[in-house]
Image (tube, rainbow, N blue to C red):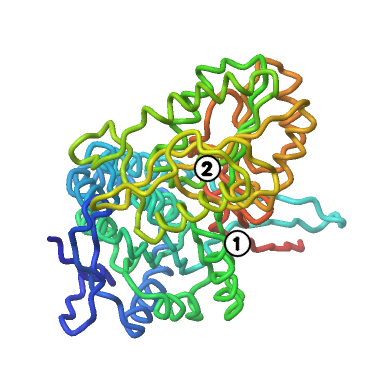
Amino acid sequence: MRTEHNFIDGRFVVAPEQPALSVFDPATDVQVGSVSAASPAQAIQAVEAASRAQRSWAALPSIERAQHLRRLADALEACADDIGAALACESGKAPGEARNEALYAAEITRYHAEWARRIEGEVIPSDTRDETLLLKREAIGVVACLIPFNYPVYTLLRKVAPALIAGNTVVVRPSNNTPLSAFAIARAVQQAQLPDGVINILAMQHDVAATLCTQPAVGMITLTGSVRAGRTVLEYCKANIAKPSLELGGKTPAIIEADADLEAAAAAIVASKTTHCGQLCTAIERVYVQASVHQRFLDLLRDKFAAVRIGNRAEDAACMGPLISAGSRDEIHAKVQRAVAAGARIEAGGYLPEGPGNFYPATLLSACRQDMEIVQEETFGPVLPVLAYDTLDEALAMANDHQFGLSSVLYSENYRSAMKLANAIEAGELYVNRTPADPYQGYHAGWKRSGLGGDDGKHGMLEFTQTRLVVLKY
């Protein structure tokens, strides 16, 4: 069993008197780790350490910060086995998949290191002939990074790497469900010999998170999480008018036109819905199928859903693994039951498995309506409602009739349909003839209640900057 302690100012702080957070394997219900829960004083200590380090870190030429990031990427690769082992036991992921997440985190770290020579300001024309306006990009200061449980290794570096290259320092709060991998990353930070205080990682309860996020030195809070968590962060931001960057819930619609490659579309949708047991913000959560191919597509989905096996991915990587908690499983099953009571029909799955672990079967629902909870609320699990439509305009209207707007999908061979959605879908992303994958050179940002700001690419990096206008009279 792993025992971890908080990482503050370049070292692990051992405090035996502190309460511990227990970490369980969601596939077996067996405790796999224990992590010290940070006290309010430690949260303040971490912010102070980050604040002290930030001025000298920002003063480094950006190319030197990039060199530190490249060394961190190398250390992440060298520690990938340990990071992956920690992630696998706390998340239910297959060991190989967990190790690959660490390698992917190294890649996004290298990507953001490349921005060192590309963080640019602007020269703006003045209204007078003896004046020049310069708009400079500067660091914000200390950034609080709140990390989710579903891809905790990748998401941690997805936020930390752009924050650092822009000249900020960070205090990271991992999910209490998956903190072990974060401290394995902390050992990579030590191995990379980053300056003390640049990266701090602490596990904590919600009241201590409030202390962390409302410290005056925290200039930005970035979160990937639920809409409810996003509202909490906005309350934190009020204390010091900190900048929020929020990637929140999603309810990705997939529109299937009659001319689509139905077999390929069905296979991709099932993979999207069952990867990590459907616990992805951009996983397909509702499917709209053109009426003339609705039954055929439903049959394809039913066969593929029924073939999905559930089990411990540490023993069989071909299985679909568990949900993160028993509470999540019970909540999802209750939604399925309410959908059935409202008229939906179970085509596959829809039951609570016996035995240990937080498993839930791949569940397909037909006879759904647009106003059903199962269509309107994020499931964050392996449950998929299917609806029929007659015209693309009708499908587009249903796809947009929603509180969320993170990602969207179209399967069609008609370029007119693709352009119609590209210009009218109310979402931050549209994927045509493929399922979402968040390319890190793009920009992952949601509309509506799916968030404020975003991650990835140039625009994700610029989220971690603020501007200074310099007016030069000569």
Compared across the picture, whether 426 is left or right of 208 comes to right
Percent of width and height locating residue 246: 56, 58
- Marks 1 and 2, how far apart in space? 29 Å
Q: Which residue is mark 1?
A: 466
Could you tell me residue 221's position as x and y percent? 51, 66
Residue 215 in percent (x, y) is at 47, 80
- Nearer to me, 138 or 371: 371
Residue drawn at 37 percent across, 46 percent down: 360
Q: Can you say which quadrant of the picture contains the N terminus?
A: bottom left
Instruction: Kindly identify the amino acid type of the residue bearing the numbered disc 1.
Output: Gln
- Give the residue at mark 2: 282
Residue 317, visible in the rendered structure? yes
Viewer-proximal residue among 414 and 429: 414
Give the amino acid type for the residue marked by disc 2 in the picture: Thr
- Quadrant, the C terminus: bottom right
Q: Which residue is painted at 36% across and 75% down in the image?
A: 205
**Which of the 4 quarters of the picture holds residue 254?**
top right
Q: At 40% from the left edge and 65% from the top edge, which residue is drawn?
A: 170
Judge from the rendering whether residue 266 lies leftward or rightward of residue 466; answer left or right.
Answer: left
Nearest the eye: 227 or 374: 374
Q: Would residue 192 be visible to someone looking at this image?
A: no
Q: Is residue 63 above or below residue 207?
A: above
Local secondary structure at mark 2: loop
Mark 1 or 2: the one toward you: 2
In percent of width and height, residue 290 lies at 69, 24
Residue 426 vs 419, above or below: the answer is: below
Q: Residue at x 76, y 27 (%)?
A: 392
Element type at marker 1? strand
Instruction: Estimate how packed mark 1 is, as few (under 14), some (14 to 19) or many (20 or more) residues with alpha carbons within 10 Å.
Output: some
